[in-house]
Image: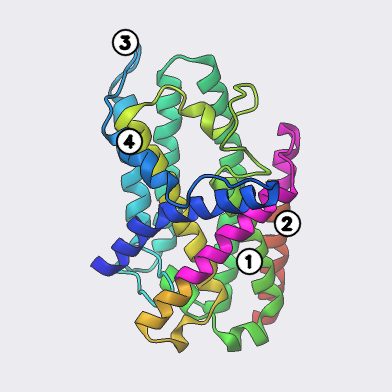
Amino acid sequence: MVARMLVCMVFSPFLLGVIGKTKALFAGRKGPPYLQLYYDIFKLLQKGSVYSRTTTWIFRAAPLVSVTAVLVAAFLIPLGSLRAPIQFWGDVILFAYLFGLARFFMILAALDTGSSFEGMGASREAAFSCLSEIALFLNFAVLAVLSKSFSLSGMIGACSWFSWTTMRPSLVLVDLSCFMILLVENSRIPIDDPATHLELTMIHEGMVLDHSGPDLAFILYAGAIKFFVLGGFLITLLLPFHFYNPAMGTVVFLLGMVFLAAAVGVVESAMARLRLNRVSTFIIGSFVLASFGLMIALARAF
């Protein structure tokens, strides 16, 4: 379990560096170093936080709640050959709503500042997350039907090369839908641009304008772990890790995560950010893919 958490906590910021390097490569630039997020987090931890007189304890607690919630979610999901330390029937519900808890506190913190820009970002975050959660649960329903399990470990563990040969259409649709949800939940292009500074178009970044110092470091770190956990879910679903021993499986898993981060960088380089009124259409697309996957799974089951 210690090795598993070290992999998650140490490796996750590196993936955002891979995304940045991939985007820089497509733009013909050198780009920031792979370890840039490590430097940023370390620098922010050495600074002090500034708090407005209008904020309450919610504003200070939100970053800690956010990073704690995503770390607990990491305990519920198998990552490659590394088994989940916590497994029980229905843990898929807890997994989804741990992310919901982190988002809820970040939205409250944004509203707590009294800033119209942060309130606007919080409103968009709440609206889009409602749609993405429905698609996420539909994907869980597909995996539950295929695996006949309502536990994350059972859902993912049942997916093997045999499953891909017999249930390929449903699994392909689930993987495509999960990739789209990954972009939505992590506020990546084409949903949001994490590098933007235009307040009228920001979603997630607009919510954290007033955070500074260690609080901002926790938010950045929570975002990296969230990407790692959701990406780990997708990679573990794609690859048959039960064929490998733990050491080799971990290496294959990390290589798969690097490839996924590079794929996200390619998507962000090839696509422009969507207009806000088109974001909901993109999320509904992931819902439609999951719905077709569920219908195919139910048709095969019954």
Q: Which mark is residue 288?
A: 2
Between 97 and 31, the residue placed more toward the observer is: 31
Rendered view: 8 above or below 26? below
Secondary structure state at the residue bearing disc 2: helix
Which residue appears at 73% of the width and 65% of the height? 292
Amino acid identity at mark 4: Lys
Q: Earlier in the sequence, mark 1 or mark 4?
A: 4
Q: Earlier in the sequence, mark 2 or mark 3?
A: 3
Q: CA distance from mark 1 to mark 4?
A: 37 Å
The residue identified by callout 4 is 43
Amino acid identity at mark 1: Asp
The residue identified by callout 3 is 53
Q: Earlier in the sequence, mark 4 or mark 3?
A: 4
* Apparent side of residue 239 relative to residue 48 in the rendered image (left or right): right
Percent x, y of residue 6: 29, 62
Q: CA distance from mark 4 to mark 3?
A: 25 Å
Q: Which mark is residue 210?
A: none
Rendered view: 213 above or below 67? above
In the rendered structure, which segment of residues is drawn in magenta?
A: 254-282
Secondary structure state at the residue bearing disc 3: loop
Q: Quadrant of the N terminus?
A: bottom left
| Neighbourhood count class around disc 3 (C-alpha, 10 Å): few under 14, some 14–19, many 20 upward | few
| Neighbourhood count class around disc 4 (C-alpha, 10 Å): few under 14, some 14–19, many 20 upward | few
Confirm whether residue 144 shows in the render.
Answer: no
The residue identified by callout 1 is 175
The answer to whether mark 1 and mark 4 are in CB contact below 8 A is: no
